[in-house]
Amino acid sequence: MRLRILLFFQFFLFLVNAQDCTLDLGSDNLELITKVFQLNEAQIGQVEGWKAQLAVESRLIEEQIKELFNTHPQSNYDEIEAMSKKYKVFQDKLVNLSLSYDNKLVQVFNDKQYERYVTLCNEAALDPLIKKSQ
Protein backbone atom coordinates (compact mmCIF):
# COMPACT_ATOMS: atom_id res chain seq x y z
CA MET A 1 0.00 0.00 0.00
CA ARG A 2 2.80 2.42 0.85
CA LEU A 3 4.36 1.75 -2.55
CA ARG A 4 1.18 2.74 -4.34
CA ILE A 5 0.89 5.92 -2.33
CA LEU A 6 4.53 6.82 -2.97
CA LEU A 7 4.22 6.14 -6.70
CA PHE A 8 0.97 8.13 -6.86
CA PHE A 9 2.59 11.17 -5.28
CA GLN A 10 5.58 10.94 -7.60
CA PHE A 11 3.23 10.77 -10.58
CA PHE A 12 1.19 13.70 -9.23
CA LEU A 13 4.34 15.79 -8.77
CA PHE A 14 5.33 14.96 -12.34
CA LEU A 15 1.97 16.23 -13.61
CA VAL A 16 2.22 19.42 -11.60
CA ASN A 17 5.70 20.11 -12.98
CA ALA A 18 4.84 19.27 -16.59
CA GLN A 19 4.85 22.51 -18.55
CA ASP A 20 5.62 21.32 -22.08
CA CYS A 21 2.77 21.30 -24.55
CA THR A 22 2.89 17.70 -25.67
CA LEU A 23 0.94 16.08 -28.46
CA ASP A 24 1.07 12.56 -27.03
CA LEU A 25 2.00 10.91 -30.29
CA GLY A 26 2.05 7.53 -28.56
CA SER A 27 -1.64 7.67 -27.66
CA ASP A 28 -4.67 6.78 -29.75
CA ASN A 29 -5.08 10.43 -30.76
CA LEU A 30 -3.50 10.09 -34.20
CA GLU A 31 -6.79 10.77 -35.97
CA LEU A 32 -7.40 13.84 -33.83
CA ILE A 33 -3.85 15.12 -34.43
CA THR A 34 -4.32 14.54 -38.16
CA LYS A 35 -7.58 16.51 -38.23
CA VAL A 36 -6.58 19.36 -35.91
CA PHE A 37 -3.32 20.05 -37.72
CA GLN A 38 -4.54 18.99 -41.17
CA LEU A 39 -1.55 16.73 -41.77
CA ASN A 40 -0.76 15.91 -45.38
CA GLU A 41 -0.14 12.36 -46.61
CA ALA A 42 3.63 12.59 -46.20
CA GLN A 43 3.27 13.84 -42.63
CA ILE A 44 0.75 11.10 -41.84
CA GLY A 45 3.19 8.48 -43.12
CA GLN A 46 5.96 9.90 -40.95
CA VAL A 47 3.71 10.04 -37.91
CA GLU A 48 2.54 6.45 -38.36
CA GLY A 49 6.17 5.31 -38.58
CA TRP A 50 7.16 7.31 -35.51
CA LYS A 51 4.18 5.99 -33.58
CA ALA A 52 5.26 2.42 -34.33
CA GLN A 53 8.86 3.16 -33.31
CA LEU A 54 7.69 4.84 -30.13
CA ALA A 55 5.54 1.83 -29.27
CA VAL A 56 8.50 -0.53 -29.62
CA GLU A 57 10.84 1.67 -27.59
CA SER A 58 8.21 2.28 -24.91
CA ARG A 59 7.46 -1.42 -24.64
CA LEU A 60 11.11 -2.12 -23.86
CA ILE A 61 11.10 0.38 -21.01
CA GLU A 62 7.75 -0.91 -19.74
CA GLU A 63 9.21 -4.43 -19.65
CA GLN A 64 12.06 -3.11 -17.53
CA ILE A 65 9.50 -1.55 -15.17
CA LYS A 66 7.65 -4.88 -14.87
CA GLU A 67 10.94 -6.60 -14.15
CA LEU A 68 11.70 -4.03 -11.47
CA PHE A 69 8.31 -4.57 -9.80
CA ASN A 70 8.64 -8.35 -10.02
CA THR A 71 12.19 -8.65 -8.71
CA HIS A 72 12.92 -5.72 -6.44
CA PRO A 73 12.56 -6.35 -2.69
CA GLN A 74 9.55 -4.56 -1.21
CA SER A 75 9.45 -5.73 2.38
CA ASN A 76 10.25 -2.45 4.12
CA TYR A 77 10.14 1.28 3.55
CA ASP A 78 13.81 1.59 2.52
CA GLU A 79 13.41 -1.07 -0.17
CA ILE A 80 10.24 0.54 -1.44
CA GLU A 81 11.90 3.95 -1.51
CA ALA A 82 14.88 2.52 -3.41
CA MET A 83 12.52 0.89 -5.88
CA SER A 84 10.59 4.14 -6.36
CA LYS A 85 13.83 5.93 -7.25
CA LYS A 86 14.61 3.27 -9.85
CA TYR A 87 11.06 3.53 -11.12
CA LYS A 88 11.44 7.31 -11.44
CA VAL A 89 14.40 6.77 -13.79
CA PHE A 90 12.25 4.57 -16.04
CA GLN A 91 9.37 7.03 -15.83
CA ASP A 92 11.66 9.87 -16.90
CA LYS A 93 12.88 7.76 -19.82
CA LEU A 94 9.30 7.21 -20.98
CA VAL A 95 8.46 10.90 -20.69
CA ASN A 96 11.61 11.95 -22.54
CA LEU A 97 11.03 9.34 -25.23
CA SER A 98 7.47 10.54 -25.81
CA LEU A 99 8.62 14.14 -25.83
CA SER A 100 11.32 13.37 -28.41
CA TYR A 101 8.73 11.95 -30.81
CA ASP A 102 6.37 14.88 -30.22
CA ASN A 103 9.31 17.12 -31.04
CA LYS A 104 9.85 15.25 -34.33
CA LEU A 105 6.23 15.94 -35.24
CA VAL A 106 6.54 19.64 -34.44
CA GLN A 107 9.61 19.84 -36.69
CA VAL A 108 7.62 18.68 -39.74
CA PHE A 109 4.76 21.11 -39.18
CA ASN A 110 4.46 23.80 -41.80
CA ASP A 111 4.13 27.39 -40.61
CA LYS A 112 0.33 27.33 -40.43
CA GLN A 113 0.29 24.03 -38.51
CA TYR A 114 2.90 25.32 -36.09
CA GLU A 115 0.93 28.53 -35.54
CA ARG A 116 -2.16 26.46 -34.70
CA TYR A 117 -0.08 24.35 -32.30
CA VAL A 118 1.34 27.44 -30.55
CA THR A 119 -2.13 28.97 -30.25
CA LEU A 120 -3.55 25.81 -28.67
CA CYS A 121 -0.59 25.59 -26.28
CA ASN A 122 -1.01 29.21 -25.26
CA GLU A 123 -4.72 28.67 -24.62
CA ALA A 124 -3.80 25.76 -22.34
CA ALA A 125 -1.06 27.85 -20.64
CA LEU A 126 1.60 25.35 -21.70
CA ASP A 127 4.99 25.92 -23.30
CA PRO A 128 5.05 24.91 -26.98
CA LEU A 129 7.92 22.84 -28.26
CA ILE A 130 10.26 24.98 -30.34
CA LYS A 131 10.32 24.46 -34.09
CA LYS A 132 13.86 24.74 -35.35
CA SER A 133 14.43 26.81 -38.47
CA GLN A 134 15.03 24.77 -41.58
Image (tube, helix red, strand yellow):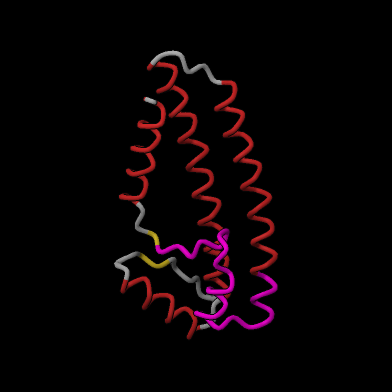
Rendering coords of residue 116 (x, y %): 43, 81
Q: Is residue 100 left or right of residue 123?
A: right
Q: Which quadrant is the N terminus positioned in?
A: top left
Residue drawn at the location 44% of the way across and 17% of the way down? 79
Q: Is residue 65 left or right of residue 22?
A: right
Q: Is residue 71 above or below residue 113?
A: above
**Does 126 appear in magenta?**
no
Q: Is residue 82 above or below residue 101?
A: above
Residue drawn at the location 69% of the way across and 79% of the way down? 42
Residue drawn at the location 51% of the way across and 75% of the way down? 133
Q: Is residue 25 above or below residue 114?
A: above
Rendering coords of residue 58 (x, y %): 61, 47
- Quarter of the image where one finds residue 49: bottom right
**Does 27 appear in magenta?**
yes
Residue lying at the far front in this picture: please name it: 1
Q: Which residues are magenta?
A: 21-46
